[in-house]
Each structure stands twice: as C-alpha cells, then as structure tokens.
Image: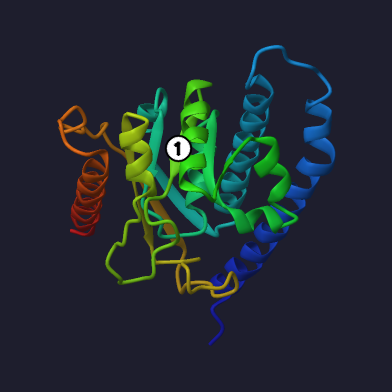
Amino acid sequence: MIDFNRVWRWFGTAFSFFLFGLGGLLLTCLVFPLLAIYPMKEKGVKQQRMQKTVQLCFRLFIKCMSSLGVLSYEIIDADKLKDAKLILANHPSLLDVVFLISLVPNACCVVKGRLTKNIFLRGPIKAAGYIINSDSNTLIAASKESMSLGNALIIFPEGTRTTADSDLVFKRGAANIAIRCEAPVTPVVIKCTPTTLTKNDRWYQVPNKKVHFRIQVNEQLPIDYLSADIAVSKKVRQFNSDLKKYYTKELLKHEQ
C-alpha cells in the first residue's frame, strides 16, 4: 500500500533542497553584491550584515520545510543564545547548522574547506566571513578575531555528523578554541527523531514518519581549571573529555 504521507514528504524534501540551492545562488549572485554596495567604516559591520541576511534566509527555509510537513521542531531556551560567544552543539543531522544559524543573527561558523568548492555554499561562506577549518594556529587566531568583532562562533565538536547508534567522538578543535580563547561556552543539545540526513543518509532516504527536531539551549559550561597552573594542552584534553561526558549524559537524559 502506498504511503501518501511519505510520498508527499519526499517531494517536500526534494523541493526544499532545490530551494536551498537556488537560494544560495541568488544570495551569491544578487543579494550579497547589492548589500556590499554601501561601504562601512567599522570593521566587521559588512560581514554582520551578510550574517543577518543568511540568518533570515535560514529561518524562512526552516519555516518552509515545516509548512510542507517535512519536519517539526521545538526550540527551548533560545534566549540563552543572545549574548553567546562560543556555541557548541552535537551534530546528528545536516540541518543542525541551518537551525542554529536561524537562531543567531551574528553567527560565524567554522566550516570544512571542501565546502568552499560547493557552488551553492561558497558565496554565503565567503560573504558571511565563516572560518575555514584548515590550520589549527590559523583557526585559533581567526576565532579570536571573530569573537572580538562581536560574532557568536558555532562549532560542532564532533567535526562531522554523527552516525546513528554510534558513540560520540569529539575532536579537540572546539576544546582548543574554548581554552585558548578563554571563551564562555554555550552548549546546545540537538535531538532528531527519527534520524535523518546523517553522515550515511542521502536526501532521498525519507524516514517513515515526519522528523522532529528538539533543540535545547543550556546554561553556560563552567571551565573550573581554566586558570589552573597546568599545561594548556592538558586543559584542552581535559575539557574535550568533559564535553564528551556532558553531551553523552544530556542525550541519554532526553531519551528517557
């Protein structure tokens, strides 16, 4: 028997991806050049204008997907992102970054270098001043500068999307930035049920039922040993371990 609801969500997903790609091209070829016409004396103001534009587009995109019945979502305590400096989140789905940017008007993301080769993404990435994750020393310097300009840095400590039913594996990049930049960490816990658009999924593999995203913004994480008289590399390792324990505990809590 044909599941017409699933068929509808398949077409809704296909249309959403088409819309996303078209939006990326329009931003690159039309919107950003128009926004760049007006010169700004203050450093970073032009990029923040671009970031705000991306935020509004992503917010519209999420609402479009919700209206089409592709997904539903709930955002809990989003007001805690208002003055965030460093936002860390787990990464269960391709849509995580879209949700987070839609909530943060001054978002600056750390992205993989290969994304700059994507014709739909490289324009927004460059215009919004997102940071390319290449060299670790360059990454730290760029992160400090971005936060000094008033941006909120978004990073996924896993470095890539989670594989369903696998243990969390955190790379040290996020912990390294938190420790070396002495940046307050605002943790976001993302739960996607059922799983979709994971590392092993293709866009056309639509789940049996509508996907629901639960996005919980928690209180800032204290780093008690930040001023301790120990090597910075040890602080980074310790905080990375603490992050993994924290997110493992939080995700288990939401499953109960």
Question: What residue appears at the point 21 percent right and 39 percent down from the top-left corner?
Answer: 231
Within 10 Å of disc 1 (Cα), the crowding (few <14, some 14-19, many 20+) is: some
Res. 130 image quadrant: top right
Its colouring scheme is rainbow
- Mark 1 — residue? 140
Question: What residue appears at the point 84 percent right and 23 percent down from the top-left corner?
Answer: 37
Question: What residue appears at the point 47 percent right and 42 percent down from the top-left corner?
Answer: 137
Residue 148 image point, x, y percent: 48, 21
Question: What residue appears at the point 38 percent right and 56 percent down from the top-left corner?
Answer: 158
Residue 54 image point, x, y percent: 64, 37
Residue type, numbered disc 1: Ile
Disc 1, SS: helix
| Residue found farthest to the bottom | 1
- Front one among 228 and 113: 228
Quadrant (top left, top right, bottom left, bottom right) of the C terminus: bottom left
Left/right of residue 211 with respect to residue 216 in the rendered view: right
Residue 238 image point, x, y percent: 20, 46
- Front one among 103 and 171: 171
Compared to 146, does 245 lie above or below? below
Residue 201 image point, x, y percent: 51, 73
Compared to 82, does 214 lie above or below? below
